[in-house]
């Protein structure tokens, strides 16, 4: 399998427990291994500064060689120059509206449960948070970092590498290729 010479990488591949193990045992090891392998293959790794800032919050900087972080090309997307189809915006707004309504139904459900007094306040809060998070945040782009990530990939005409299903779903709508984590791990394992 031939891979492009540049990719846009997301924080999730280094911190998500299901994906970081493709490259290491912890976020630092995963990042170091990933960068060493992409460097050996001649693949340029890009990240918007907002994603890099997010990633740095999860890393123990003392255990990361300086050349590893400097290999990642921090490039802000051209937010005022890259245009997205109006259908993309229409679908995003519709998706948000549907999710807000789901959140409202969850709030109503737990208000009724709370009024019945069958469960403790702590139990209700934990359950409502879990359901609310799934209803409103899973499978959608929900941050400025997500937008930066997609715009940069579109601008560079580069595939993305992420384990975030929302980013994958919305990248597909924009015609941005999402690399499969297992396939890229295999490619990076071969010699350059």
Image: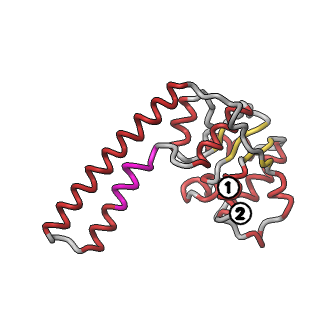
Residue 124 position in % (x across, y down): 27, 67
Packing grade of label 1 (10 A; few <14, some 14-19, many >=20) is: many
Residue found farthest to the left: 116
Residue found farthest to the front: 80
Residue 36 sits above or below residue 186 on the image: below
Residue that mark 2 sits on: 29
Q: Are the residues at dot 1 and dot 2 in contact (C-beta closer than 8 Å)? A: yes
- Quarter of the picture containing the C terminus is top right
Give the mark, 1 or 2, whose residue is nearer the N terminus: 1
How many tags in the picture?
2
Packing grade of label 2 (10 A; few <14, some 14-19, many >=20) is: some
Q: Is residue 184 left or right of residue 123?
A: right
Quick check: can you spot residue 1?
A: no
Residue that mark 1 sits on: 23
Which sits in the foreground, 107 or 61? 107
Q: Determine the image quadrant of residue 18.
A: bottom right
- Alpha carbon separation for disc pair 1 and 2: 7 Å
As for residue 36 lying within the magenta part, the answer is no
Q: Determine the image quadrant of residue 5.
A: top right
Residue 110 sits above or below residue 177 on the image: below
The magenta stretch spans which residues? Answer: 129-139
Residue 146 position in % (x across, y down): 59, 45
């Amino acid at each position: 399998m031939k891979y492009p010479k540049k990719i846009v990488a997301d924080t999730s591949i280094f911190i998500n427990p299901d994906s970081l193990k493709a490259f290491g045992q912890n976020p630092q090891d995963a990042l170091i291994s990933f960068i060493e392998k992409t460097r050996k293959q001649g693949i340029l790794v890009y990240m918007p500064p907002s994603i890099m800032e997010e990633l740095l919050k999860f890393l123990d900087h003392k255990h990361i060689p300086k050349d590893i972080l400097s290999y990642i090309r921090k490039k802000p997307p051209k937010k005022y120059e890259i245009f997205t189809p109006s259908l993309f915006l229409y679908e995003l707004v519709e998706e948000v509206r549907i999710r807000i309504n789901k959140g409202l139904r969850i709030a109503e459900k737990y208000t009724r449960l709370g009024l019945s007094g069958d469960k403790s306040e702590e139990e209700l809060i934990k359950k409502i948070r879990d359901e609310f998070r799934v209803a409103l945040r899973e499978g959608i782009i929900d941050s400025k970092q997500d937008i930066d990530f997609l715009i940069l990939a579109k601008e560079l005409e580069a595939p993305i590498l992420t384990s975030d299903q929302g980013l994958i779903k919305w990248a597909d709508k924009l015609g941005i290729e999402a690399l499969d984590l297992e396939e890229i791990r295999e490619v990076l394992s071969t010699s350059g």
